[in-house]
Image (tube, grey):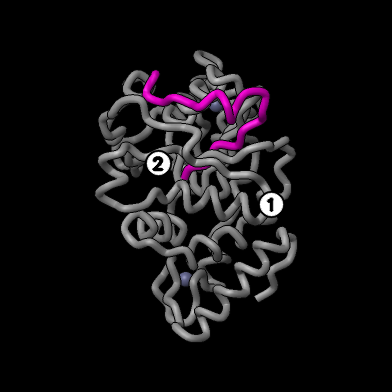
């Protein structure tokens, strides 16, 4: 595999994973095919979101501008962008990462999204993942958003400080809540450590975004802690079932749209 366009430390890391793959052949995180962490056909099926996007929250729109949700209430992040839609092999890979601690898959996905990451024009001083609740962290033993954030930061030579943002209180699962209920559920749920965020431009990282409510609540905590600006990046975006093909007038997640665990 070619490990270009990445910081040298990440290239070393990626070559180590090539060695591990040689010793212990992996299966593809998207389709279970033997011999790959992320196989060529899953790579082919995973496209960056294209066409006009909401300038702030990054959902596809019929024409450039802001979506109605962002016009009504501005999110705290300056922009949210996602590599690809939450469907097909990428959805499989993300669900797999929730219960299997798989650094090899995270590394492979980081490489696959590197051209997308490199094209984002954002100033980044610090990378911070969306934190899990302490209870869920104990159940799972790791935070998949943190694995992704660390890997992206390594690929770009950015500093990553997961401990800087914590959940100040427990929240309900966002599953099945309306966009408004989601915002209220997570409002004020996070707290940032001023000592590390003050005066810095922060890249917030998660696996999936749905309405962006959790990312916005995190961004607000970071701004309250003195961050100059916050950008948000996720591997995938859960899109309403009626995209593409219909003009999008609003973004209320469909009940079948999966599903950001909190
Ligand atoms: Zn595959
Ligand atoms: Zn928007």
The answer to which image quadrant residue 131 occupies is: top left
Instruction: State the image coordinates of residue 178 (x, y, percent, origin top left).
Output: 32, 25
The residue closer to the viewer here, 153 or 106, is: 153
Location of the N terminus (image quadrant): bottom right
Q: Could you tell me how far apart the alpha carbons at marks 1 and 2 are, in whole angstroms? A: 34 Å
Q: Which residue carries the number 1 mark?
A: 156
* 189 magenta-colored: yes
Instruction: State the image coordinates of residue 195 (x, y, percent, origin top left).
Output: 57, 26
Q: Which residues are magenta?
A: 187-206
Q: Tell me if residue 114 comes above or below residue 229 in the rendering.
A: below
The residue closer to the viewer here, 61 or 245, is: 61
Classify residue 129 as left or right of residue 116.
left
Number of residue marks: 2
Q: Which residue carries the number 2 mark?
A: 241
Identified at 58% across, 74% down, the residue is 16
Identified at 42% across, 64% down, the residue is 102
First in residue order: circle 1 vs circle 2: 1
Location of the C terminus (image quadrant): top left
Identified at 43% across, 36% down, the residue is 210
Instruction: State the image coordinates of residue 65 (x, y, percent, origin top left).
Output: 65, 24
Does the numbered disc 1 mark a residue whose Cβ is under 8 Å from ligand 1?
no
Q: Is residue 87 visible?
A: yes
Q: Secondary structure at mark 1?
A: helix
Q: Secondary structure at mark 2?
A: loop
Classify residue 60 as left or right of residue 184.
right
Name the front one of labels 1 and 2.
1
Identified at 49% across, 72% down, the residue is 37
The residue closer to the viewer here, 131 or 3, is: 131
Instruction: State the image coordinates of residue 51 (x, y, percent, origin top left).
Output: 65, 41
Badge 2: residue crowd in 10 Å (few <14, some 14–19, many ≥20) = few
């Amino acid at each position: 595999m070619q490990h270009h366009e990445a910081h040298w430390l990440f290239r070393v890391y990626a070559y180590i994973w090539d060695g591990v793959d040689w010793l212990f052949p992996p299966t593809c995180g998207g389709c279970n095919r033997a011999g790959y962490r992320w196989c060529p056909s899953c790579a082919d099926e995973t496209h960056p979101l294209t066409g006009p996007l909401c300038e702030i929250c990054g959902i596809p729109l019929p024409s450039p501008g802001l979506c109605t949700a962002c016009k009504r209430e501005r999110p705290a992040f300056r922009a949210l962008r996602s590599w690809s839609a939450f469907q097909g092999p990428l959805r499989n890979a993300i669900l797999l990462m929730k219960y299997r601690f798989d650094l090899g898959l995270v590394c492979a996905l980081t490489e696959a999204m590197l051209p997308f990451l490199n094209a984002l024009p954002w100033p980044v001083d610090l990378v911070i993942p969306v934190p899990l609740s302490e209870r869920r962290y104990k159940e799972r033993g790791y935070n998949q958003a943190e694995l992704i954030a660390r890997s992206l930061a390594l690929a770009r030579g950015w500093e990553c400080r997961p401990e800087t943002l914590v959940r100040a209180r427990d929240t309900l699962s966002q599953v099945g809540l309306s966009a408004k209920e989601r915002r209220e559920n997570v409002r004020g749920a996070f707290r940032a450590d001023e000592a590390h965020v003050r005066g810095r431009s922060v890249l917030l990282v998660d696996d999936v975004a749905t309405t962006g409510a959790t990312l916005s609540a995190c961004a607000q905590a970071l701004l309250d802690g003195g961050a100059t600006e916050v950008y948000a990046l996720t591997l995938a975006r859960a899109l309403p079932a009626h995209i593409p093909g219909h003009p999008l007038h609003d973004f209320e997640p469909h009940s079948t749209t999966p599903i950001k665990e909190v």
